[in-house]
Amino acid sequence: MAPAVLDVLRLMAEGKSNHAIADALYVSVGTVEKRIAAVFSKLGLSAEPDLNRRVAAVLIYLRESLSG
């Protein structure tokens, strides 16, 4: 079964690398990269020179999970 986007985002929030996420979810790094791209798309995070999309995605996730 493919990992859910939320599973990947949760592991990103824990500071895991793509390889560590792949190992934890028993999938390929390519699958993790596709899920991360889906996270960025769903959150509307486009590539910008002054924005680290991975950090922005984690901050949004944390804000939403803490607010209930």
Image: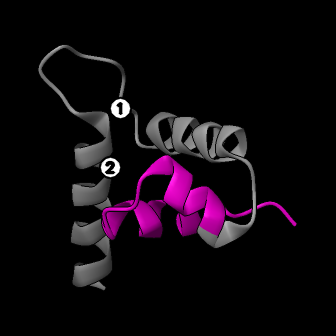
Quadrant of the drawing holding the C terminus = bottom left
Label 2: element kind: helix
Q: Which residue is mark 1?
A: 45
Task: Kindly check if marks 1 and 2 are in contact, taking CB atoms under 8 A apart as contact.
Answer: yes
User: Where does residue 55 sit, x and y in percent of width and height?
Assistant: 23, 47
User: Where does residue 9 sit, x and y in percent of width and height?
Assistant: 46, 60
Determine the image quadrant of residue 50: top left
Per the rendered image, the range of residues in magenta is 1-23
Determine the image quadrant of residue 49: top left
Label 1: element kind: loop
User: Where does residue 67 sit, x and y in percent of width and height?
Assistant: 23, 81
Q: Which residue is mark 2?
A: 57
Identify the residue at horizontal 30%, vertical 35% (top origin). Answer: 53
Q: Is residue 52 magenta?
A: no
Query: Height in image: 12 above or below 38?
Result: below
Query: Height in image: 13 above or below 49?
Result: below
Identify the residue at horizontal 32%, vertical 43% (top origin). Answer: 54
Amino acid type of disc 2? Answer: Ala
Identify the residue at horizontal 23%, vertical 82% (top origin). Answer: 66
Q: Is residue 17 magenta?
A: yes
Query: Height in image: 66 above or below 20?
Result: below
Q: Is residue 44 left or right of residue 19?
A: left
Identify the residue at horizontal 73%, vertical 48% (top origin). Answer: 28
Numbered label attached to residue 9: none
Amino acid type of disc 1? Answer: Leu
Give the Cα distance between marks 1 and 2.
Answer: 8 Å
